[in-house]
Image (cartoon, helix red, strand yellow):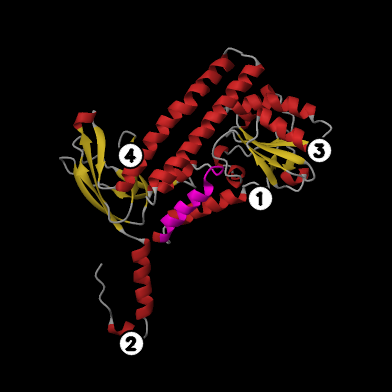
């Protein structure tokens, strides 16, 4: 960018202000380019570039690629580093992690059955490597026990068998999340792809190292929106760590009664997030019936938050599972502010609070939850 100074700016002392504005722009904004050749895309089929906001689950249109009659394009964009998706007609979409100054080249790989080949962005390379590892880890650790649990549920297996299989799936998913943290810390580094990995961070594993990765990233990009979002995410994890005060929760139950977490002050409270589609959650509901009966004379209760996006589905699942303990829902699913308040991005998830409302344990289920309560109510 070429800047020509008006002499009166210098006389009136406005030069420092102008310099500050130009400097801010150079820090916060940058240019990047996307070029390539996609012969299968016609001039009337306009690919669109969207910027991703993971926290709001929203996209903003950054611009369009102008494709000529032979499928060639070369477009310049202005904006800060971030996570993007390039959408083609026919629901074809690719994810991109782009830093300023990068020149991406996108081409069709004929040898790979028409797959898109992307060059010129180490950050996108890191993002694709992360996604490839994530899918492999899911297939190895989560899908087998999940399939076994679904099959056992369908054939009406015993409660003990379902509980054992449910625990295997939960443990498999926990191991999967830990592997993703490992990959993020050891492979992603200061790449813009770090923002993409933040969607699945496990706050119970290597959190200090994740925080250091965010600090290192933000040191070079202090004004970037994704820097601020990742800093806020780590800070929110601290707010739901062991010893932290449980955030306020309030809503209505199926019978229209209002409930607040504060209503149970003075008791040990298991704050349990669940949904009808979460099989381990459903298995645990049956365990809760026995647990509450066992501790009926103790200072213990369960306060559940349902994350279905349909009231009727919530009601059907509650009746089938015989949920009699207090529970609330706003029928917003993953968009629920209650889920956000406790950083709930996977199910099942629960928090055990002491009589003062402090978090003393997270994600205790089955035998582990029973052991913890036995320790409390000696």
Q: Is residue 76 left or right of residue 247?
A: left
Q: Is residue 126 left or right of residue 372?
A: left
How far is disc 3 from disc 1 in space, using C-alphas?
Answer: 21 Å
Number of numbered discs overlaid on the protein picture: 4
Residue 174 shows up from this direction: yes
Judge by depth and name the residue closer to the eye, 255 or 350. Answer: 350
Disc sitting over residue 244 in the figure: 1
Answer few, some or many: residues within 10 Å of disc 1's Cα (few below 14, many 20 plus, some between 14 and 19): some
Question: Any magenta on residue 154?
Answer: no
Is 8 above or below relative to 219?
below
- Label 2 or label 1, whichever lies nearer to me, is 1
Q: First in sequence, mark 2 or 3: give its number.
A: 2
How far is disc 3 from disc 4 in space, using C-alphas?
Answer: 52 Å
Q: Which residue is mark 3?
A: 299
**Residue span colored magenta:** 203-219
Callout 1 secondary element: loop
């Amino acid at each position: 960018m070429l800047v020509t100074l008006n002499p009166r700016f210098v006389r009136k002392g406005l030069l420092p202000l102008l310099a500050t504005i130009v400097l801010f722009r150079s820090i916060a904004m940058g240019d990047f380019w996307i070029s390539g050749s996609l012969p299968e895309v016609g001039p009337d089929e306009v690919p669109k570039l969207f910027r991703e906001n993971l926290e709001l689950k929203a996209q903003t249109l950054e611009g369009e690629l102008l494709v000529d009659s032979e499928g060639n394009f070369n477009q310049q964009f202005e904006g800060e580093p971030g996570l993007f998706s390039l959408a083609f007609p026919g629901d074809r979409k690719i994810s991109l992690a782009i830093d300023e100054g990068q020149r991406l080249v996108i081409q069709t790989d004929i040898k790979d059955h028409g797959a898109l080949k992307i060059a010129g962005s180490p950050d996108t390379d890191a993002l694709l490597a992360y996604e490839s590892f994530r899918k492999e880890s899911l297939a190895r650790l989560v899908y087998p026990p999940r399939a076994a649990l679904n099959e056992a549920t369908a054939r009406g297996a015993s409660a003990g068998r379902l509980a054992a299989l449910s625990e295997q799936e939960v443990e498999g998913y926990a191991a999967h999340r830990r592997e993703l943290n490992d990959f993020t810390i050891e492979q992603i580094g200061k790449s813009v792809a770090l923002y993409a990995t933040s969607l699945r961070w496990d706050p119970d594993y290597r959190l200090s190292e994740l925080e250091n990765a965010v600090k290192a990233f933000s040191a070079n990009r202090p004004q970037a929106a994704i820097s601020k979002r990742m800093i806020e995410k780590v800070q929110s994890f601290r707010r739901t760590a062991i010893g932290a005060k449980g955030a306020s929760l309030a809503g209505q139950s199926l019978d229209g009664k209002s409930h607040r977490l504060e209503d149970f002050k003075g008791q040990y409270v298991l704050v349990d997030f669940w949904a009808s589609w979460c099989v381990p959650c459903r298995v645990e509901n049956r365990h809760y019936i026995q647990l509450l009966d066992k501790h009926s004379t103790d200072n213990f209760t369960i306060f559940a938050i349902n994350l279905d996006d349909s009231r009727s589905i919530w009601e059907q699942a509650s009746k089938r599972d015989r949920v009699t303990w207090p529970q609330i829902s706003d029928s917003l699913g993953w968009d629920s502010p209650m889920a956000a308040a406790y950083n709930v991005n996977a199910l099942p998830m629960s928090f055990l609070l002491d009589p003062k409302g402090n978090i003393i344990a997270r994600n205790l289920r089955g035998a582990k939850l029973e052991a913890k309560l036995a320790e409390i109510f000696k």
